[in-house]
Amino acid sequence: MYWLYLCLAISSEVLGTSFLKLSNGFSILYPSIIAVCCFLFSFYFLSLTLKYVPVGIIYAIWSGAGIFFISLIGVIFFKQSLDIAALIGMSLIILGVIIIYTLSDSLRIN
């Protein structure tokens, strides 16, 4: 069940960050409200996840997945570009998440 909570936390965070970009520094009302609501949902679902898995492990997965997805959204929707250093860095983050997921005993439910 904690994987569902984690997926909802990551999705909400990525959506919130996307709307934060659209809010233009909280100067546009509706994207600002949506961003804040998404971040609240994200932290709520993250807190539910933390009942089952250690904070360091979940935060690594949450932030790593968030970096990947928000970068992808930035490229697709906001026409941003990533240089080779950014791509290598993000690849290492994703590799770290994969290593945690496949090799760590810390993901066992408490």
Image (cartoon, helix red, strand yellow):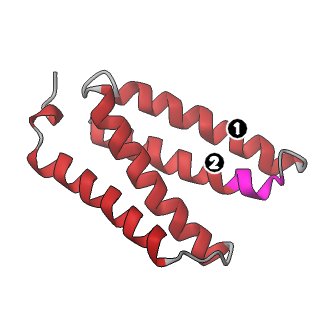
Q: Answer yes or no: do the residues labelled 2 and 1 have beta carbons within 8 Å?
A: yes
Within-10-Å neighbours for mark 1: few <14, some 14–19, many 20+:
some
Q: Which residues are magenta?
A: 19-24
Residue visible at 72% across and 50% down? 20
Q: Quadrant of residue 2?
A: top left
- Numbered label attached to residue 58: none
Q: Nearer the viewer, residue 70 or 88?
A: 88
Residue 71 in percent (x, y) is at 53, 65
Q: Secondary structure at mark 2?
A: helix
Q: Point out the tag, 2 or 1, that comes first from the N-terminus.
A: 2
Q: Secondary structure at mark 1?
A: helix
61 lies above or below 73: above
Q: Nearer the viewer, residue 105 or 96?
A: 96
**Residue position marked by numbered label 2 in the rendering:** 16
Task: Tell me the quadrant of the picture where the N terminus can be found.
Answer: top left
Residue visible at 78% across and 51% down? 31
Q: CA distance from mark 2 to mark 1?
A: 7 Å
Within-10-Å neighbours for mark 2: few <14, some 14–19, many 20+:
many
Q: Quadrant of residue 78?
A: bottom right
- Numbered label attached to residue 36: 1
What kind of residue is marked 2? Gly
Residue 102 in percent (x, y) is at 12, 51
Q: Which residue lies most toward the front here?
A: 85
Task: Tell me the quadrant of the picture where the C terminus can be found.
Answer: top left
What kind of residue is marked 1? Val
Residue visible at 77% across and 58% down? 22
| Drawn side of residue 105 relative to residue 49, left or right | left
108 lies above or below 71: above
63 lies above or below 49: below
